[in-house]
Image: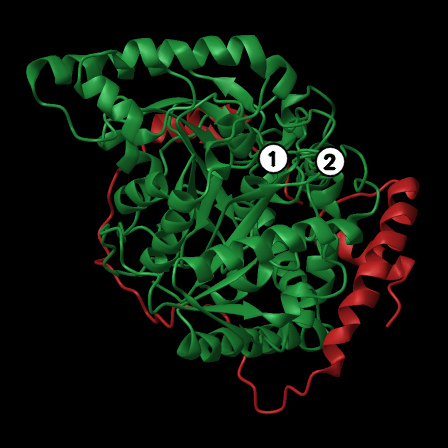
Amino acid sequence: MFENLTIKQAAQLLSEGKTTSQALTRYYLDRIAKYDGEIGAYLRTASEYALQRAKESDERRAKGTSLGLLDGIPFGVKDVILTKGIETTAASKILEGFIAPYTATAVERLEAAGAVMLGKLNCDEFAMGSSTENSAYQLTRNPWDTTKVPGGSSGGSAAALAADLAVFTLGTDTGGSIRQPASFCSVTGIKPTYGRVSRHGAIPYGSSLDQIGPMAKNSEDLTILLEVMSGPDGKDATAVDQEFSTFNTQLPMKGAKIGIPKEYFGKGLDPEVDAAIKAAIEKYRELGAEVVEVSLPHTAYAIPTYYLIVMAEMSSNLARYDGIHYGNSILRTGEQVDNLLEVYTRTRSQFFGPEAKRKILLGTFELSAGYYDAYYKRAMKARTLIKRDFDAVFKQVDVLIAPVSPFPPFAIGEKKDDPLSMYLADIYTVPANLAGVCALSTPAGFSSTNLPIGMQLIGPAWGETKILSAAQQFERATEYHKKFAQL
Amino acid sequence: MAFTQKDIEYAAQLSRITLTDEEKSEYLSQLSSMLGYFESLSELDLTNVEPTQQVTGSTNVWREDVADATVARDDLMANVPVTENGSIKVPNVL
């Protein structure tokens, strides 16, 4: 009864009285206890808290004051998102023991709708990475093949869905961190338009790129979640007031124009991924869409542009971890500390992981006197050109189809020692963050060794209903999102 | 433009991080190859292109300058590594 439930299926069981939120919550907590030792999706569960919230949900339902579709539905939250009273670490040792003093708006809104938080999910440290291997705490394994990575940085959020350890999860996406793990784990995930969801309570990585986004078992669930999560809250100056309607056929396929960006299908794309995306394109033709080749001419510059910008922004964002105000500190260790400077240098040196340090160093260097114009400023200008490419293309077509990752999930340890090769894997996802447009990943097939391959749908800014509608119609015509990992 | 040992030491000093010799040499080669790859941006003609700082187009998002106590002082102080009489305690600055 409980296997691989979507939000609507779970909500139906609850409203028909076939189960309770407490039973559902216990189902997931039991599964986490049974399977998560091997998968490693959760950093910590909040069982008492979850069961209490589930109890409150059941009581509301008994009184006839149920809050709606999400009331009583269990979910997990990526550990870069603050949850009051619960340890929040960003998967870094520098926030070990940090108890969040407030809850992120996105989570608050889901909880106000009655959803039941199960716990915090593993990720790359400070959301930096594409495999979750940069977590300072534990490895997360891909439930489809436990020798493979789940993707990153929201690897725990994706793996939890693939292993059926939650009905939905929250991730963040700065350069692909929702879409790529969704693709690697055969689940759905959306990076909203920049400014759609408040970043209040999301530990910042690249402030001009970050978005919190929902991850779930199908696009319909993403639509339900996005409606609850989106909109300004008065606490994020970059959140924009734009209506989000959940009518589900916002983009009928007959008459729709789908663009295939030619730069995304060249050298470096694994033939099996290429075949899966091409088959998906054919499916859209069958559904009645007109498919056209388009060009995003500055695609080759997206990786350098993205990394120069994100490293600069994160080096500034991570300056707050100083061992003084909160988080881990050399002052907690009992060691002799002679002066204030030592508090900073010894705390940061001891408790940041290598990827954090590398990026801080390069980000700091490129912002320093004499280098700012050559690197950061150039990258900001290149960003303008990349954004213009998307503005132009969306005058010609409604949505774009593209791969998410150049290859299916890779082996744990395979890319860890070659950071640059890991960065190059982000080629298809970073452009949407640079342009600020919306993009999602939905299952589109499997490799010859049964590894998931996701398809990316990219839409114009504020065009979430277009890509969600296109994804839903694809899901109705295919069975990929109904295939589940066997644990 | 080569990224040298001096550059990495300068960046480390600015960002308040101390590196071991092993970290210096490992990061030096990784960061050099990254910067080398990023040099491709010099191929672009960026004359008269305005930099994009953020994509929403919003400017000057204001609110009333009124203090609100939505985060409890005790919750904030509970995370401070060293306190004394309700204050944050730090070693000598000078």
Q: Is residue A45 left or right of residue A85?
A: right
Identify residue for label 1: A323
Query: Secondary structure beneath disc 1?
Result: loop
Residue at 55% of width from left, 37% of height from top? A186
User: Is residue A203 among what the camera can see?
Assistant: no
Residue at 28% of width from left, 41% of height from top? A224
Q: Quadrant of the C terminus of chain A?
A: top right
Q: Is residue A457 left or right of residue A40?
A: left
The picture quadrant where one finds residue B74 is: top left
The picture quadrant where one finds residue A251 is: bottom left
Closer to the N terminus: mark 2 or mark 1? 1
Query: Secondary structure beneath disc 2?
Result: helix
Residue A267 picture location, percent across and down: 76, 64
Question: In the depicted view, which residue is nearer to us: A375 or A122?
Answer: A122
Question: In the depicted view, which residue is nearer to us: A440 or A131?
Answer: A440
On what subunit does the disc labeled 1 rest?
A
Q: Which chain is red?
A: B
Q: Which chain is green?
A: A
Q: Residue extending furthest bottom?
A: B48
Compared with B54, A38 (above or below) is: above
Identify residue for label 2: A346
Q: Are marks 2 and 1 in contact (CB under 8 Å)?
A: yes
Residue B33 picture location, percent across and down: 85, 60
Label 2 packing within 10 angstroms: few (<14), some (14-19), many (20+): some
Residue at 46% of width from left, 32% of height from top? A482
Label 1 packing within 10 angstroms: few (<14), some (14-19), many (20+): many
The picture quadrant where one finds residue A97 is: top right
User: Is residue B17 among what the camera can see?
Assistant: yes
Amino acid type shown at disc 1: Gly
Amino acid type shown at disc 2: Arg
On what subunit does the disc labeled 2 rest?
A
Kindly report the distance in space between the C-alpha atoms of the residues bearing marks 2 and 1.
Answer: 9 Å
